Amino acid sequence: MPTKRTVDYSDYANQIVKAIPRGILLTTKADEKVNAMTIGWGTLGTNWSRPVFVAYVRRHRSTIVLLDRNPEFTINVPLEERPSDRKIIGICGSERGDEVDKVALAGLTLVDSDIVSVPGIAELPLTLECRVIYRQDQELSLYSPDIMAHYPQDVDGRATGSNRDPHITFFGEIVNAYVIEG
């Protein structure tokens, strides 16, 4: 039975920031459906005197539907590189949550959170519990031309990877942090 050890997220800030480009999970839950999505972009910081994790989610992702119904999420970060992490990151980054159960497909172990309703994931044990305090649609016309390469307008918004959809920026206040053990 997994246990949780409460931590100060800032003690792990460097590790979180280094893990983001390799892929971490953003997990959502609404109406008893849990979905885990790989993210490779994110920011850890302070806004409005609150600790926040800022996540970017493309408009046509099933994660958006779940966040609209329940504006909470967890961020799940590996503490060490394991071969199974690449498989998890791959499945959660290439499959669509509205078409398959990514949690079952990736063999993820869900662990109830303490404050938010979205579970942590034992396989990526460093967990940040977050509540959305602000969201903003990104405006493609404001990007520089080199950034626009990430938004090819001839690729359908349901495609994984780069496509025409802009991201929605979510500021999640970090309300709890822990490491899942055992």
Image: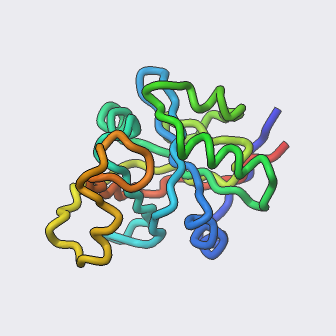
The residue positioned 59% from the left and 58% from the top of the image is 23
Where does the C terminus fall, quadrant-wise? top right
The residue at the far left in this view is 141
Task: Please indicate whether residue 36 sits to the left or right of residue 132 in the image.
Answer: right
Q: Position of residue 71 (x, y in %)?
A: 35, 41
| Residue in front for this viewpoint, 31 or 86 | 86
- Residue 15 appears in view: yes
Q: Is residue 134 visible?
A: no
Label count reads 0
**Residue 73, image x, y percentages:** 46, 44
Spot occupied by residue 14 in the image (x, y as percentages of width and height): 63, 76
Foreground residue among 29 and 150: 150
Q: Is residue 41 left or right of residue 152?
A: right
Picture residue at 19% right of the left edge, 64% below the top: 140
User: On the picture, is 33 further left or further right than 2?
Assistant: left
Colour setting? rainbow
- Residue 134: image quadrant is bottom left
Residue beneath the point at 45% across and 61% down: 53
Residue 156 located left or right of residue 76: left
Give me the residue at 42% from left, 42% from top. 72
Residue situated furthest front in the rendering: 154
Look at the image and tell me in which quarter the N terminus lies.
Answer: top right
Question: In the orientation shown, which residue stands out farthest toward the top?
Answer: 31
In the rendered view, would you say 109 is above or below 11?
above
82 in relation to 92, above or below: below
Q: Quadrant of residue 105?
A: top right
